[in-house]
Amino acid sequence: MASEARVARPGGSVDQPIRERVPWRLPSRVVTLCLLELEKLRHDRTELITRAVQPALWLTVFGTTFSRLHVIPTGQVPYLDFLAPGILAQSALFIAIFYGIQIIWERDAGVLAKLLVTPTPRAALVTGKAFAAGVRACAQAVIVLVLAAVLGVHLTANPLRILGAFAALMLGAAFFCCLSLTIAGLVLNRDRLMGIGQALTMPLFFASNALYPVALMPDWLRWIALANPLSYQVDALRGLLVGTPAHLALDFTVLVLAAGVGITAASALLGRLAR
């Protein structure tokens, strides 16, 4: 095959196969796919506004109401401040969990088959998709953060902490995007994926610390929350944006490992989609 071709050097030696040199192009492929995602956002800015409606409702309706009721103990932190990072994580989850529908559409349109015959490694395609979901999540997070500030949420002004929060958002979105791509590789059908995605989003959200502290949960739910990557993403966002006590080293370790496992699983199943 052309991708396995060897290149002769002037001295008569044979260069490494092109496919063996491709992994070194992984970062550039990922960046290219992320830039393509930014181009999509530039051509359809209304998507950011429409996707921001749901997190805005959670903050303005649920957040302000429960702040007045004082039914969820959050210590010295106002409930709206406690809730805002959870809503940021929720918005990233809702964006990423349906990314598998996009890749099934690309398969049906013949785009995926063309990508798979190029020298680009499958891991690069999956990683590009994963962090493109993170780019979308960060773009929407800007809108949610502005709204949270308008509502009086006490957010940090430290640029390094804000960059750390965006990194946590991207890693979380990358994992849930890969989870969606993995499910797509198993079910191979848009309707089934849509149903599974809808069945997963709310349990993942409610079985986390996004709305209430883990200490308030029954024991069985607490164990689920501790196994849920969304809980670690929310914990990191709270610690970075609001300044609550957080386990940042553990949070980022779990998010990086989850993203790595997700990319590996989705890459292994990517070829099954193109059959």
Image: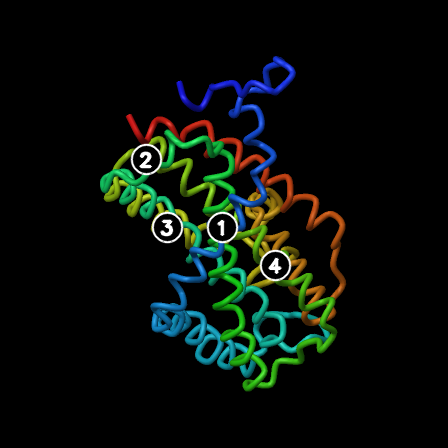
Residue in the foreground of this view, choosing between 165 and 221: 165
The residues tagged by marks 1 and 4 sit, at their Cα atoms, a distance apart of 29 Å
The residues tagged by marks 1 and 3 sit, at their Cα atoms, a distance apart of 21 Å
Query: What residue is shown with label 3?
Result: 98
Amino acid type at image mark 3:
Phe
Query: What residue is shown with label 4?
Result: 234
- Circle 2 sits in a helix, a strand or a loop, which is it? helix
Residue in the foreground of this view, choosing between 255 and 28: 28
Neighbour class for label 1 at 10 Å: few (<14), some, many (≥20)? some
**Earlier-in-chain disc, 3 versus 4:** 3
Location of residue 34 in the rendering, given as x and y in whole percent from the top left corner? 49, 53
Location of residue 75 in the rendering, given as x and y in whole percent from the top left corner? 71, 72
Amino acid type at image mark 4:
Val
Picture disc at residue 114: 2
Query: What residue is shown with label 1?
Result: 32
Which residue is drawn at the image coordinates 34% and 73% (left, top)? Answer: 46
Of tags 3 and 4, the one toward the viewer is: 3
Residue in the foreground of this view, choosing between 216 and 187: 187
Residue furthest top in the image: 12
